[in-house]
């Protein structure tokens, strides 16, 4: 996935400038930071309020209207999670994810737009991708996985699975481990441009199936998931959400420019193996 923003890091603040904002990514981030500063202080950066040059424009909005737009926020202490996570880091990650999900009061939460890449949107895009792409040549494991996921994505029942309503949570919308900062005691979170209304199973799948987790063997997924008490229905949904997002990343890797790959050699075969395991194929 192409980098969607650039950052300017100062001693106390960070300015994030957006390269893509057609889906309101900058406004999603601003809204998330504002809500979390009110309802879960300390978990995410505090949005800055630069004084606009136009006296008729409210503080903090001038940068959202600029081209490109930007958001100013406080700088958090800590380093991005990377490598094999320790038990303390896994616990900190789970606590931070749960904190985001439950921070926003119900009436406010239900008024928010859905996060970007709703599972139904992802499913429809993946079906279209499977339909137009020929089976990959070369690695037989990759070809086998492509056949298995094409069959899985075509199942009509998935439309019902991914349109079902579950208890709403606030979703970060991005499971990249680099978005989770460890300061030695706790995890805090940055990067909310995809954020919005979601459900717990989909957001947990977003974390455990993000390619940053599996390329670097960073997260013990069972240990992470064991810290959440899921209902039987959420457990079943989690299984399908993991398959969906593993397929999303499989498609992303296969669609890379071979001259400028974003992931290490062998990633496609490794992701193919993950998919086959998740599908039981």
Image (spheres, rainbow, N blue to C red):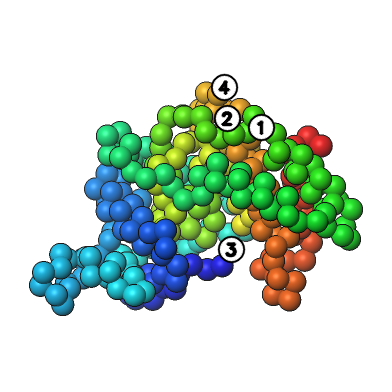
Q: Real-space Cα distance between discs 3 and 2?
A: 28 Å
Residue that carries the numbered disc 4 in the rendered image: 232
Residue that carries the numbered disc 3 in the rendered image: 1
Q: Which mark is residue 156?
A: 1
Q: Real-space Cα distance between discs 1 and 3?
A: 28 Å
Q: Real-space Cα distance between discs 1 and 2?
A: 8 Å
Residue 24 location, quadrant: bottom left
Q: Are marks 1 and 2 in contact (CB under 8 Å)?
A: yes
Q: Nearer the viewer, mark 4 or mark 2?
A: 2
Q: Is residue 99 above or below residue 1?
A: above
Q: Nearer the viewer, mark 1 or mark 3?
A: 1
Q: Are marks 3 and 2 in contact (CB under 8 Å)?
A: no
Q: Nearer the viewer, mark 4 or mark 3?
A: 3
Q: Residue at x 41, y 73 (%)?
A: 7
In what element is the residue under mark 4?
helix
Q: Residue at x 46, y 36 (%)?
A: 199
Q: Is residue 250 visible?
A: no
Quadrant of the drawing holding the N terminus: bottom right
In the current view of this chain or complex, which residue is farthest to the top?
Answer: 232
Q: Is residue 179 left or right of residue 250?
A: left
Q: Are marks 1 and 3 in contact (CB under 8 Å)?
A: no
Q: Residues within 10 Å of mark 3 (few under 14, many from 20)?
A: few
In what element is the residue under mark 1?
loop
Q: Residue at x 52, y 60 (%)?
A: 178
Q: Nearer the viewer, mark 4 or mark 1?
A: 1
Residue that carries the numbered disc 2 in the rendered image: 160
């Amino acid at each position: 996935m192409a980098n969607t923003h650039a950052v300017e890091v100062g001693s106390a603040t960070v300015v994030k400038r957006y390269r893509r904002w057609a889906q309101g990514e900058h406004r999603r981030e601003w809204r998330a930071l504002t809500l979390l500063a009110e309802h879960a202080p300390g978990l995410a950066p505090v949005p800055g309020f630069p004084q606009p040059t136009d006296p008729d424009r409210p503080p903090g909005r001038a940068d959202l209207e600029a081209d490109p737009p930007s958001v100013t926020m406080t700088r958090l202490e800590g380093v991005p999670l990377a490598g094999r996570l320790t038990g303390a880091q896994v616990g900190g990650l789970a606590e931070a994810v749960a904190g985001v999900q439950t921070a926003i009061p119900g009436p406010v939460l239900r008024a928010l737009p859905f996060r970007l890449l709703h599972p139904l949107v992802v499913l429809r895009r993946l079906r279209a991708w499977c339909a137009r792409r020929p089976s990959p040549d070369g690695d037989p494991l990759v070809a086998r996985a492509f056949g298995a996921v094409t069959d899985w994505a075509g199942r009509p029942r998935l439309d019902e699975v991914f349109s079902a309503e579950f208890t709403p949570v606030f979703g970060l919308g991005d499971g990249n481990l680099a978005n989770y900062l460890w300061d030695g005691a706790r995890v805090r979170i940055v990067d909310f441009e995809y954020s919005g209304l979601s459900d717990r199973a989909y957001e947990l799948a977003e974390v455990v199936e993000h390619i940053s987790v599996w390329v670097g063997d960073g997260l013990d997924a069972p240990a992470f998931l064991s810290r959440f008490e899921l209902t039987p229905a959420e457990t079943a949904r989690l299984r399908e959400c993991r398959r969906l997002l593993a397929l999303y990343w499989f498609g992303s890797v296969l669609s890379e420019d071979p001259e400028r790959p974003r992931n290490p050699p062998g990633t496609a075969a490794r992701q193919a193996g993950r998919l086959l395991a998740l599908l039981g194929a």
